[in-house]
Image: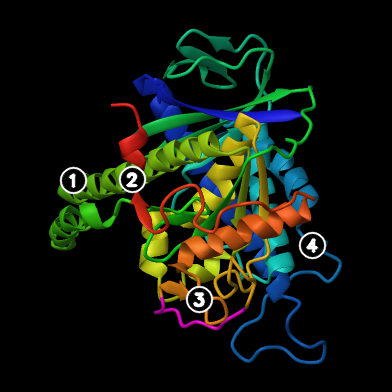
């Protein structure tokens, strides 16, 4: 089964915009009420049987069941009969809000995270079921909202059915995420002939096994001066005033522009890499720990985790390229020519093998090791020149290759 998510910008009229705001507000209230109910039930079971807290105690009957999704969904159905505010919102939308909370509690238990937080505002809600014949030219029909205009920036996919829709509030307006599904099954992409190893660098964004060093544009740093000026002005405004809200929206729109620019560059780079080889091999790195280390600012600004874990595998799947992750251990310590492992400090950016005397950029050497390891894993022989297909250490600019 194939699932694709397309994003379109909505153009609602004033009545529809007010209705979307009301749905978001009701969903926020349901989420916070359900979270409070779960926390109170857990707090009432914390104290020992023979003693209570000196200050206060949550008193909930001992036979009261834990308010999981099924219990809360049943109580929501009862509450909708008497509460006109709940009755004004589609029942499935509110149920999806409870499912979101239930998913957060499941992750809290499985991943060891803290309690979900109460929401000051919700930015999205989901219609889990779509109406029949809901797709039109520059418009879409949604439950409760009816026909709503959108900017159809791309055609709807053929031979696929719209299954669900999510409305997301951003600084630049409302957006619609439509999930399309097809019953056809697509086999995994086969291993091709040509291969490319990619190493996530520190000085450069990525290094390839062909000797290319691709530097990332400084998306956030290029806008940091403008961002600081806006935040300095924002600090002196009265909270909640019209000028405060205007500046808040300006800052949010600037952050959205930075994120969109970064994502656009990632997609262009991913397509360019897929043009170079049939197989793409990367390191299996935990980029969350990268974002907390000494290179945290560079890694967060470049968005290396988003590129390696989300965008590149999607583009490889779409283009029919083979994508795989390789064990990261000792990729920067091993010599790509003789295989000798030599410890190096992080400050040493040139690989100089003491065993065979081979010299090359450290990140490019790691990319070559990544390519060799995965080729052996998939059963291919490794035949390549030590210097790759190009000159080792030559910096490579993506935009020089893109059409003007």
The kind of secondary structure element at disc 2 is: loop
Task: Evaluate if marks 1 and 4 touch, with contact meaning CB atoms under 8 Å apart.
Answer: no
Viewer-side label of 3, 4 = 3
Query: Which numbered disc covers residue 357?
Result: 3
Label located before the other in sequence (2 or 3): 3
Badge 4 is on which residue? Answer: 66
Q: Mark 1 or 2 closer to N-term?
A: 1
Q: How is the image coloured?
A: rainbow
Task: Work out whether mark 3 precedes mark 1 in sequence or the reverse, and give the earlier one.
Answer: 1
Label 1 and label 2: CA atoms lie apart by 44 Å
Of helix, strand and loop, which mostly describes the magenta segment?
loop
For mark 2, what is the residue?
Answer: 397
The percent position of residue 131, horizontal first and vertical second, equals: 65, 16
Locate the C terminus and report the quarter of the image it occupies: top left
Q: Earlier in the sequence, mark 1 or mark 4?
A: 4
Tell whether position 347 is magenta: yes
Q: Residue at x 39, y 55 (%)?
A: 302
Rendering coords of residue 135 (x, y %)? 57, 12
Magenta stretch in the rendered image: 341-348
Q: Is residue 345 magenta?
A: yes
Which residue does the image show at 53% across and 49% down from the upper left?
A: 29
Q: Nearer the viewer, mark 2 or mark 3?
A: 3
């Amino acid at each position: 089964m194939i699932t694709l998510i397309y994003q379109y910008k909505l153009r609602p009229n004033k009545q529809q915009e007010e209705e979307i705001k009301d749905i978001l507000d009701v969903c926020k209230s349901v989420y916070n009420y359900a979270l409070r109910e779960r926390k109170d039930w857990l707090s009432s079971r914390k104290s020992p049987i023979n003693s209570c807290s000196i200050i206060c105690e949550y008193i909930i009957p001992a036979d009261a069941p834990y308010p999981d999704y099924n219990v809360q969904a049943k109580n929501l159905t009862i509450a909708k009969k008497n509460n006109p505010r709940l009755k004004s919102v589609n029942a499935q939308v509110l149920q999806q809000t409870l499912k979101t909370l239930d998913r957060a509690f499941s992750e809290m238990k499985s991943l060891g995270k803290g309690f979900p937080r109460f929401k000051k505002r919700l930015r999205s809600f989901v219609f889990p079921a779509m109406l029949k014949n809901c797709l039109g030219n520059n418009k879409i029909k949604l439950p409760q909202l009816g026909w709503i205009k959108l900017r159809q920036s791309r055609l709807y996919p053929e031979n696929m059915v719209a299954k669900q829709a999510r409305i997301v509030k951003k600084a630049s307006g409302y957006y619609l995420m439509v999930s399309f599904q097809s019953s056809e099954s697509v086999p995994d992409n086969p291993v091709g002939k040509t291969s490319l190893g990619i190493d996530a660098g520190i000085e450069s964004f990525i290094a390839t096994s062909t000797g290319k060093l691709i530097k990332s544009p400084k998306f956030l740093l290029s806008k940091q001066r403008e961002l600081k000026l806006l935040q300095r002005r924002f600090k002196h405004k009265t909270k909640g005033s019209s000028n405060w809200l205007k500046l808040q929206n300006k800052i949010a729109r600037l952050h959205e522009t930075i994120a969109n620019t970064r994502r656009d560059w990632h997609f262009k780079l991913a397509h360019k890499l897929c043009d170079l080889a049939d197989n793409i091999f990367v390191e299996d790195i935990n980029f969350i720990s990268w974002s907390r280390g000494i290179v945290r600012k560079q890694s967060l600004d470049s968005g290396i985790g988003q590129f390696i874990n989300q965008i590149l595998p999607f583009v490889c799947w779409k283009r029919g390229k083979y994508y795989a992750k390789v064990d990261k251990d000792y990729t920067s310590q091993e010599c790509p020519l003789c295989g000798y492992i030599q410890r190096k400090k992080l400050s040493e950016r040139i690989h100089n093998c003491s065993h065979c005397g081979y010299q090359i950029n450290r990140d490019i050497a790691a990319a070559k090791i990544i390519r060799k390891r995965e080729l052996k894993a998939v059963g291919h022989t490794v035949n390549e020149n030590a210097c790759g297909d190009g000159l080792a250490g030559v910096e490579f600019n993506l935009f020089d290759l893109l059409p003007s």
